[in-house]
Amino acid sequence: MNMYEDKKNLLLDMIAFSTVDGHLNKKEYEFLFFIANELNIEKGGFNDLFHQELPMLSLKNESRRIQQFYRLALLMHNDAIAQGKEATAIKQIAIRMGLNPEAAKRVLKKIEKSPGTTIATDVLLKIFKEERS
């Protein structure tokens, strides 16, 4: 798969996740648009993604799956309201991605306790590594 397709699929996953509660609020849209800009996807291409079907998650590299899960977790907490459907959906997504559910819960709790702060990649990977042992 080419780099553009990887970026597009990440955004498709994030769009699907952000609309699991039936709507997309302004903060969630802005966050998604920010991610699109960071991935060098222009606004027209970004808006077109809202009309496409979500592909199956197919990231084989565990560290990339963890990073994608983290991005999705940030999206969930971006609107400062962890909706029941969103909380359930992100846990299911972690399982579908083949990630350890306990590590995913730890990451979610860490984000909840420190909203607005980021988790360093090495710390994030360490959480998942610890749960494997």
Image (tube, grey):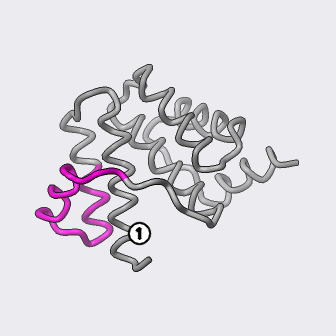
Which three-letter amino acid code belongs to the residue tagged 1? Answer: Asp
Identify the residue shown where x is 33% and y is 75%: 4
Q: Left or right: 127 with respect to 107?
A: right
Q: Looking at the picture, does residue 114 appear above or below residue 127?
A: above
In magenta, the rendered stretch is 32-54
The one nearer the camera, 8 or 119, is 8
Residue positioned most to the left: 44
Query: What type of secondary structure mainly makes up the magenta span?
Result: helix
Quarter of the view holding residue 41: bottom left
Give residue 93's position: percent from left, percent from top: 53, 41
Q: Please check the rendered image and state whether residue 75 is part of the magenta-colored stretch, yes or no.
A: no
Q: Is residue 35 left or right of residue 42?
A: right
Q: Residue at x 63, y 62 (%)?
A: 63
- Residue 42 image position (x, y, % from top left): 17, 68
Q: What is the residue that sits farthest to the bottom in this orientation?
A: 2
Tally of numbered discs = 1
**Left or right, 86 with reference to 61:** left
Q: Position of residue 129 (x, y in %)?
A: 78, 53
Q: Quadrant of residue 79?
A: top left
The residue positioned 37% from the left and 61% from the top of the image is 9
Relative to 43, does residue 78 appear above or below in the rendering? above
> Circle 1 sits on which residue?
6
Which of these two is toward me, 33 or 116? 33
Task: State left or right for residue 20 relative to residue 116.
Answer: left
Q: Dot 1 surroundings within 10 Å: few (below 14), some, or many (20 or more)?
A: some
Quarter of the image for the N terminus: give it: bottom left
